[in-house]
Amino acid sequence: MGCDDQQNAAKSSLRIQDIAVLMQDHCRMLDPAKVERIINEFVQGGPERMQLVSDFDYTITKQRTEDGSVVPSSFGIFNACQSLPESFKTESDKLYHKYRPIEIDPHMPIPEKVQYMVEWWTKSGALTTGFPFDQSEIDQIASKYKNALRDRTHEFFADLQRLGIPTLVFSAGLGNSVVSLLRQANVMHPNVKVVSNFLQFRNGLLDGFQQPMIHTFNKNETVLDGSEYYNLVHTRDHIIVMGDSLGDADMASGVPASSHIIKIGFLFDHVEANMDKYMKTFDIVLVDDQTMDVPRALLALIEKQHQLKQQSTAQSSR
Ligand code: MG7
Ligand code: MG
């Protein structure tokens, strides 16, 4: 490398302290040098090598709204539908109270939890069977929560579309609610794919969920093996992962080991008690951040370098 080249390389390498959003008080990193290194890889690799994998509930929706109103989960939106039989609601509540504590038990090993989660989703599917149901009910409830998406979600999805970055919204919740909310918020662009549990119908009646079952602990790219989406993204080895639960950090496991991944964790509940684990699990931990500003800032850096490259190619081919 000549002296000029070296200077140029040094110039084009970003320093983390110059990235303002990452220097905010509520933005925490265990290893800022690692984040800096991967951001530089992302910027050099360009949008063609990027993919985004995001959780839905409380990652795309807000953990806290300005007026203090509670945002329902995707299952919650379904459960709020008026036409559901009373017995469905009571039975489904019982399941929640039995299995939710197991899901978040800090002591039980994950392989043991898996059987319980399969049981929960299976029983929940069995309950969601044998009565008529119309998607318009979900749409009506979801329309009330279009504004409960993180600030700048619309801009974020527009960035992803403009840059042609495949975007996977991965949810162990109910896909019908996820898609309804994303559609009504006008962010369901062609580059967005939702992998989740979708309602199944038979002879006009509900018949549980479609396969494959997506539960808390199989929510990763291994369930996509061989699928059309897998073929689309398996060469994209620069990955942004976003989630609000510790398990979300594993959503990209199944991609080649050589991939570079930045994991962004949104932390809101019991900040002090959770901080340690979140710091160890996510590369960037955002404390009570109800915006898409940090992931957008990463895309902006990638886009800027991409434009510079395109300009210089255009100039040299003149
Ligand atoms: N979760 C999982 N299941 C159910 C269900 O049948 N009803 C309700 N209300 N919640 C459920 O977004 C995924 C989260 O939804 C919860 C089968 C789990 O806590 C899961 O992490
Ligand atoms: Mg979530």
Image: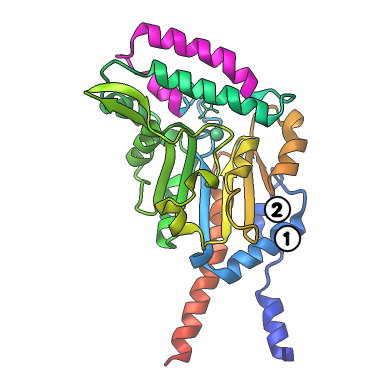
Q: Residue at x 52, y 77 (%)?
A: 308
Residue 17, image x and y in percent? 73, 60
For mark 1, give the secondary structure: helix
Residue 24, image x and y in percent? 69, 49
Q: Residues within 10 Å of mark 1 (few under 14, many from 20)?
A: few
Disc 1 from disc 2: Cα separation: 7 Å
- The N terminus lies in which quarter of the figure? bottom right
Give the colouring mode of the picture: rainbow
Q: Quadrant of residue 16?
A: bottom right
Q: Is the residue at mark 2 in contact range of ligand 2, meaning its CB lies under 8 Å from it?
A: no
Residue 18 seen in this snapshot: no
Above or below — where is 137 with respect to 287?
Answer: above
Residue 300, image x and y in percent? 53, 61
> Which amino acid is tagged 1?
Gln
> Which amino acid is tagged 2?
Met
For mark 2, give the secondary structure: helix
Please give the residue where the numbered disc 2 appears in the rendered image: 23
Please give the residue where the numbered disc 1 appears in the rendered image: 17
Q: Which residues are magenta?
A: 74-103
Above or below — where is 90 with respect to 314?
Answer: above
Above or below — where is 193 with respect to 128?
Answer: below
Circle 1/circle 2 CB separation < 8 Å: yes
Q: Quadrant of residue 318?
A: bottom left
* Front one among 178 and 269: 178
Q: Residues within 10 Å of mark 2 (few under 14, many from 20)?
A: few
